[in-house]
Image (spheres, helix red, strand yellow):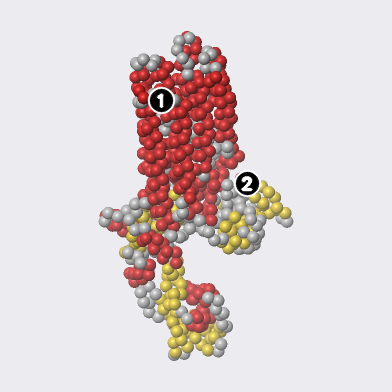
Amino acid sequence: MYTCPMHPEVRQEGPGMCPECGMSLVKLKTVPKRSLGQSPKLRLGRNSGTHDRHTGHVTQDFLKKFWVSFALTVPVILLRDEPFIPLILGSIVFFYGGWVFISSAWRELRGRSPGMMTLIALAIGVAYTYSVAVVLTGRGDSLFWELTTLITIMLLGHWIEMRAVSGAQGALKELSKLLPDTAEVVRGETTESVPLEKLQLRDVLLVRPGSRVPADGKVVEGDSEVNESMITGESKPVSKNTGSEVIAGTVNGTGSLKVEVTKIGKNTFLAGIMRLVQEAQASKSKLQLLSDKAAFLLTIIAITLGTATFLFWFSQEEGFAFAVERLVAVLVIACPHALGLAIPLVASISTTLAARGGFLVRQRLSLELARNIDIVLFDKTGTLTTGSYGVTRAEDSVLQLAASVDARSEHVVAKAIVEEAQRRGLKLLDAQDFQSITGKGAKATVEGVEYRVEGSESAGAETTVSVVKGNEKIGDITLADKIREESREAVQKLKSMGVKIAMITGDAESVASWVAKELGIDEYFARVLPQDKSAKVKLLQERGLKVAMVGDGVNDAPALTQADLGIAIGAGTNVAIESAGIILVRNDPRDVAKIIRLSKLTYSKMLQNLFWATGYNVVALPLAAGVLASQGIFLQPALAAVFMSLSTVIVAINAVLLRRASL
């Protein structure tokens, strides 16, 4: 169990970011007996109810503490020459406004993760202890006005930071908002509103027009169109009628639906997505690992430099009070909050963008790798092609006759012919005396004339069917495993990005060659058994290529694992494919180009944030230490607090700009 140093009420299983302030969670030594709920809404980091119910409460506490501290700071500044009034008011500010930083530092140290709160606590603790000692001994000048000003500004800065961070994050928050709080369960002739956690399997729900679907289920009555864009990325409403499956969180259209619940709690599609998002937020990319090390190193540097600064100025004529002031300024300016947020904020937003774009990031390292991919290896069947026969060439009159003969046939070729005739709106003619001819085709009498639909020799990837009247051939129909139109667009987009395309299939050489030629694929591997696919991936890697493999995650699992980037197709509700770092929610190869583009955008933003997070430290730390003291230039602790908070806000705002990106 992990918690936030700043917000102890935030708890979750596994590492991650605080939804309030964005700080890295630290490990608890003891796990509370009360376990997290199983509903998706209860897995958002809080152990005391749903996230939405408490959002903003802690944030507003900081604003309240700021106003109280501000009101007490004014007389401290005005009466700073009086010994006891600043002591009394300063003590109130320290314990009321500053104690949150002390307790947060204690949680950081207990979690063996010293950082921002540790430095702030050291700064205000040293200033307060020194000031109390001055008043009690009557020797020296106290730092109460600097202390109260520092705490007040830190409270305001942290409140502003939390608002900025809260706006920058949102993957889990947005997903949690998809679910309604209650569902209408059909009880005989009436309906009863019940909380989601009380739903049971096989309950029948009434989903009214415009409302959200409360649980995964199957339509048992009604017709409507459902907007699934927030779940699958599909922009067009999807038609739903009796027997159709619906997903919790999607929005019903203009018709009413009665839905039988088939999945609840952690087994729902949305819960599966949220688990993947949590995994992504808990995982770390190379850049984040680098920034984490840098943040820890900065903490050590700050304490070391602060100590050295204090010792240097204490040895000079300026005296003990000035040395303490320089120590406090160094500790405050070096707070690594911006550095710690630089990468996680961007990663959190990119996770949300990915979900909106129709794919889910399980491992951030996978998304980071995508920008360097040289070649994408697609599994053919079901990815680039539909995996079923379809008519590629046929005249309407010939197709109409063939479909009329094959209307009662169960053969896959016959079904494809009938489906194409229906798609074209051709009326099927009345057929009599239907007879299936094993190994050849079928025959029937249409409008008093006998017609035969016969198969002929296959040429390459195509199968040709002839319509014959007596001894006269009326015409031919050509069929093949249909190439998806999305595949053509996907190949074009990837090639425009400088990425090569390869295909792997268990089909014959002629089939693979035809599909590759139709789509403009650079190279292909035919007649490859499932267990040999990973060897082909390795072959590409031995040529120095970074390989992304796109497959279904079942027989392609070894290849997905071998590839530099495994992209699994999470069609239906299979959202827990362990062999891939990224999962396509819908079976759309065009989303692969989106992955690469998002990877490049994310990496660019991460570098920008690292620049902002480290750049100000390079300039401000020497100033805080007093390197320009000879010029009369000093960085006061309160101003250091402003700069520290400002750097965090800049990082958060820069991360938010990623939301405007178009994939």
Above or below, 138 relative to 566: above
Q: Nearer the viewer, mark 1 or mark 2?
A: 1
Depth check: give the residue in front, 227 or 435: 227
Relative depth, front residue between 318 and 131: 318
Amino acid type of disc 2? Answer: Asp
Q: Which mark is residue 73?
A: none
**Where's residue 97, x and y in %?**
54, 25
Residue at mark 1 to residue at mark 2: CA–CA distance: 55 Å
Name the amino acid, label 1. Phe
Specify whether residue 34 is in view: no
Residue 93 % position (x, y):
54, 22
Is residue 506 positioned above or below 10 on the image?
below
Camera sees residue 225? yes
- Residue at 47 percent across and 38 percent down: it is 649
| The furthest residue to the front | 631
Lower sequence index among marks 1 and 2:
2
Residue at the (35%, 63%) spot, across then down: 503
Q: Nearer the viewer, residue 557 or 45?
A: 45
Q: Which residue is mark 1?
A: 634
Q: Residue at x 47, y 42 (%)?
A: 653
The answer to whether residue 84 is left or right of residue 14 is right
Residue holding disc 2: 181
State the quadrant of the C terminus: bottom left
Residue at left offset 45%, top offset 20%: 126
Which element type, helix, strand or loop, lies under badge 1? loop
Q: Is residue 506 above or below residue 154?
A: below
- Residue 334 position within the rendered picture, expressed as x and y whole percent measured from the top left: 40, 30
Seen from this angle, which residue lies furthest left? 543
> Relative to 150, is 457 above or below?
below
Residue 637 image position (x, y, % from top left): 45, 25
Dot 2: few (<14), some (14–19), or many (≥20) neighbours within 10 Å?
A: few
